[in-house]
Image (cartoon, grey):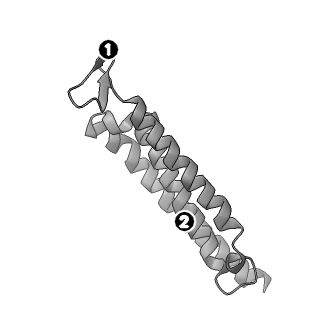
Amino acid sequence: MTASHDNAVTTDAHGGAHGSIRTYLVVAAILVVVTTLEVFTYFLPYLAVGQPMHWLLLPVLSCMAFFKFWLVVSFYMHLHYDAPFYTRIFYIPLSVALAMTIVVMLLTATMKSRLFW
């Protein structure tokens, strides 16, 4: 492996770019912090079921999970360093799947409230 000028990106023998060890450690630290926030968010009393703001729990946890997914895919799967074409190839279907998941969750919640209440 050879280091680049700014020591932030290294390339392997096949020409693929990778982040430096420092980059991976920073991303790992961010993942630890966000995971800790997720755990603490789950146990917040004002987000518990039956409380006025309980509806915020799922969107908040989902946003944090999506952020962690983005970090892992971008840095540990080296998508951050790939060509923009490959990034689009990955993120376009991902956004469609995310939109479909949200729609199904909203429809299920709406139909459940109409069918069983």
Q: In this view, does 79 lie above or below 36?
A: above
Front one among 22 and 68: 22
Q: What residue type is labelled 2?
A: Ile
| Residue 102, disc | 2
Relative height, residue 19 to residue 70 (above, below):
above
How far from the left and from the top, in percent, is residue 68? 51, 50
For the N terminus, give its image quadrant.
Answer: top left
- Residue named by callout 1: 14
- Residue 97 showing in the rendered view: no
Q: Quadrant of residue 37?
A: bottom right
Task: Look at the numbered disc 1 and give the secondary structure of its residue.
Answer: loop
Q: Which of marks 1 and 2 is nearer the N terminus?
A: 1
Number of marks drawn: 2
- The residue shown at (53%, 59%) is 64
What amino acid is labelled 1 in the image? His
User: Residue sitting at 27 percent across and 35 percent down?
Assistant: 83
Q: Residue at x 55, y 55 (%)?
A: 34
Is disc 1 in contact with disc 2, using a CB cutoff of under 8 Å? no
Residue 5 visible from this viewpoint: yes
Mark closer to the observer (1, 2) = 1
Q: Which of 18 and 94 is in front in this view?
A: 18
Q: In this view, does 112 lie to the left or right of 67?
A: right
Q: Alpha-carbon neighbours of circle 1 within 10 Å: few (<14), some, or many (≥20)?
A: few
